[in-house]
Amino acid sequence: MSLKMVKIRQALTSCPLPDIETEICAEIEVLQLQGRVKPSQSVAIGCSSRGIANYGLIITTLVKSLREIGLKPFLFPAMGSHGAATAAGQKRVVEHQGLAEEKLEVPIKSSLDTVKIGNLGDDTPVLIDRFAYEADHIVIANRIKSHTEFTHVFESGLMKMLAIGMGKEEGATLYHKAFMIEGYPAIIEHVATTIFNTGKFLFGLGIVEDGLLQTAKIAAFGAEELLEGEMELLKLAKKLEPKLPFEDIDVLIIDEMGKDISGSGFDAKVVGRINMPLVSPEPETPRVKRIVVLNLTDVSNGNADGVGSADFITRKLYEKIDMNALYVNALAGSEPEHARIPMVMESARAAIEAGINTIGNIEEDEIKVMRIRNTKELSVVEVSSAYSDELKLRSDIDVIGTPKPFSFDGHGELDMLSVTA
């Protein structure tokens, strides 16, 4: 393979918060919680499964702030069927984010048990994590961003966490079935409203990241303000979210996918392939002919949900897949398409060559190949020489170094793309 790639850096918005702890404390102070809580009451803090920047610091600060007003906090996983849909697996996901019980001196209460608190219009039960229901108050903290499968005034964030996250595996499965008929927004809003009506919801902490995955904004909302507040944060998130530098791609190489990167392994809207025909149409852009994925992150614990949206994967990735974890997630999400196994190639080289050889009769120097580390880290990527003319027209992109062929090792593998150069 004589194809040459050059590393480029695209200008993405950087606007990190100067002091995360001070910001969180200020947001909580504005809520004036003292009049709504009593000393020694318990508060359940719902934790996400996503790879959120500074999440350990954010949750630690939440714990400290709630203690200071006399509450007794504990953590619980609010992540639907993630963590292989086991209590132990979900607890490990929380701990992997730097949230060990010994360090925080608060328990992590993890269970798949739920309590029914209402019904959807068709008598489908509205479910909530048992430990959260038994607490006096509930707080959640999650990143606000575009959802991989639907577009609305709220998408992935606090509202969705209240429904799919806190509903555990059973709730996530039931709600996804309902989504197929009623759509995501109506079901999520109904579930969230039912939870608000219990009087247990204290507030939600919304987090927005900038284009370089830095914490850019944090805001706290009570039940009455949460929907409108999340809508405003989503507008900001969409302005800051990174995108691929070009819209037309013959072969997109993704070094790693995983649940810590996106619920669908790699962000479906970033790559333009949602792959859920019963729920959502495909995006018009970007236009990607072939997707090659090289590896699965270790913290995914074998859950390769979304792998079915790739065209080729490596043997290395395939051997990391835990079929039970994958199937549990795909069935809970009513997305069997995401669990289909693509063609498995013996090495990165073989997978990339397969992608190139299945796009049609195009001269090698005209093949548009793009390589990214993952769909979150898009500041530094590699592109083939076919983009040379387009690069000259882009003042927002810097070319780093000179074009070079892929540096495969003796087994046809590649080192992870460095995004620091």
Image (tube, rainbow, N blue to C red):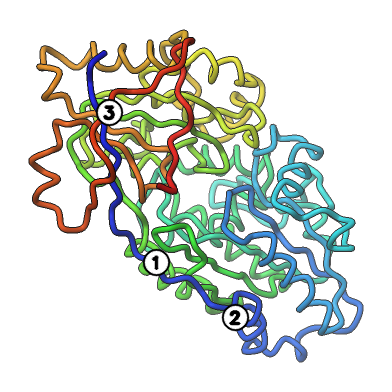
Q: Is 294 situated left or right of 35 in this image? A: left
| SS assignment at label 1 | loop
Give the amino acid at mark 2: Glu
**Separation (CA) of disc 1 from disc 3:** 29 Å
Which image quadrant is residue 220 in?
A: bottom right
Which residue is at a point 63% across and 28% down the rendered structure image? 328
Quick check: can you spot residue 151?
A: yes
Relative vertical location of residue 65 with respect to residue 245 in this rendering, above or below: below
Residue extending farthest front: 401
Which mark sits nearer the N-terminus, 2 or 3? 2
Query: How busy is the neighbourhood of tag 3: few (under 14 within 10 Å), some, or many (20 plus)?
Result: some
Query: How busy is the neighbourhood of tag 1: few (under 14 within 10 Å), some, or many (20 plus)?
Result: some
**Separation (CA) of disc 2 from disc 3:** 45 Å
Q: Is 302 situated left or right of 188 in this image? A: right
Which residue is at a point 65% across and 38% down the rendered structure image? 81
Residue 23, numbered circle: 2
Residue 108, numbered circle: none
Residue beneath label 3, please? 404
Label tally: 3
| SS assignment at label 3 | strand
